[in-house]
Image: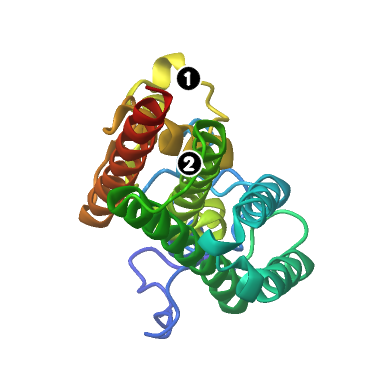
Amino acid sequence: MAAEAGSTPPHRSPPPAGDPPDDLVRGKHHLDPPGHGVDGDQGRGAPAWRRVTAGEKRIPAAVAAAVAIGLQVALPNQLTLMSRFLLPTIVLLVALVSLNPGRMDRISRPVRTLGLALIAVASLANAYSAGLLIDELVQGTHGYAPLPLLSTGAGIYLTNIIVFALWYFELDRGGPAARACGLKHHPDFLFAQMTAPDVADPQWEPQFADYLYVSFTNATAFSPTDTLPLTRWAKMIMMLQSAVSLVTVALIVARAVNILK
């Protein structure tokens, strides 16, 4: 029966204080459907890096880590820690791939811890190799011919690029899983596609190849090129990579040229 004119509408109880409305929850958690993002970017017209996406596959980063391990194994025995760390590093890599072999789209503390531990071990091994090589070059006790010296330096240099690419990949906006879930709005690295969305593919989002490119250009130009670090940690780690690359390249090339003379 229709309510009489002027009658008071029936009272409705407000929702419980601990349960926010559904429309406020959607777009804030990693279980949201694709097309939703954070901080108001919930339309399907928003660029992919601002939305919840399917997540990147594990394969590119895992292959890069395996290449870094191989480069360390190929170094002279006196310059590498891999004789001690080879088995633990392989175990970490296998465990990481086994726990998350497909797309990195789920937040998992064990997986993230394994990923960071793997990169830390690779970083330690490469820093040890670079430090010993630089020390031998400065002290004049290296005993290498030009070609072995250049190949050793190239192995350390390439490993440096891969290791820092993995750091950038794992730390930017909380890591690949957090980026896929759209948990953080503000990026640590400003890519060109973010500054010019009108000319970029709306489905573009940073993947491992993009971070590898950032690492390569930073190691060769000793400064950012088309990708800018926004946060302090990003600036400090890029500065560290540039310093390591500059010292390594300068000393190795200078010594090789001196030997050739």
In terms of depth relative to the viewer, which is nearer, 236 or 53? 236
Mark nearest the camera among 1 and 2 is: 2
* Percent position of residue 239, x then y: 24, 46
Q: Is residue 219 above or below residue 171?
A: above
Name the residue carrying label 1.
200
Q: Is residue 242 above or below residue 38?
A: above
Kind of residue sitting beneath label 2: Gly
- Left or right, residue 234 beside residue 148: left
Label 2 secondary element: helix
C-alpha distance separating marks 1 and 2: 37 Å
In terms of depth relative to the viewer, which is nearer, 112 or 129? 129
Mark 1 residue crowding within 10 angstroms, few (<14) / some (14–19) / many (20+):
few
Residue 24 picture quarter: bottom left
- Left or right, residue 9 beside residue 116: left
Residue 245: image tag: none
Label 1 secondary element: loop
In terms of depth relative to the viewer, which is nearer, 110 or 34? 110
Q: In which quadrant of the rendered image does the C terminus lie?
A: top left
Mark 2 residue crowding within 10 angstroms, few (<14) / some (14–19) / many (20+):
many
Please, which residue is most extreme toward the left here?
232
**Residue at left 45%, top 33%?**
216
Name the residue carrying label 2.
153
* Percent position of residue 220, x then y: 37, 29
* Percent position of residue 107, x then y: 58, 68
First of labels 1, 2 by sequence position: 2
**How many dots with numbers?**
2
The answer to whether one can see residue 43 in this image is no
Residue 85 picture quarter: bottom right
Kind of residue sitting beneath label 1: Ala
Q: In which quadrant of the rendered image does the N terminus lie?
A: bottom right
The answer to whether one can see residue 82 in this image is yes
**Residue at left 45%, top 80%?**
19
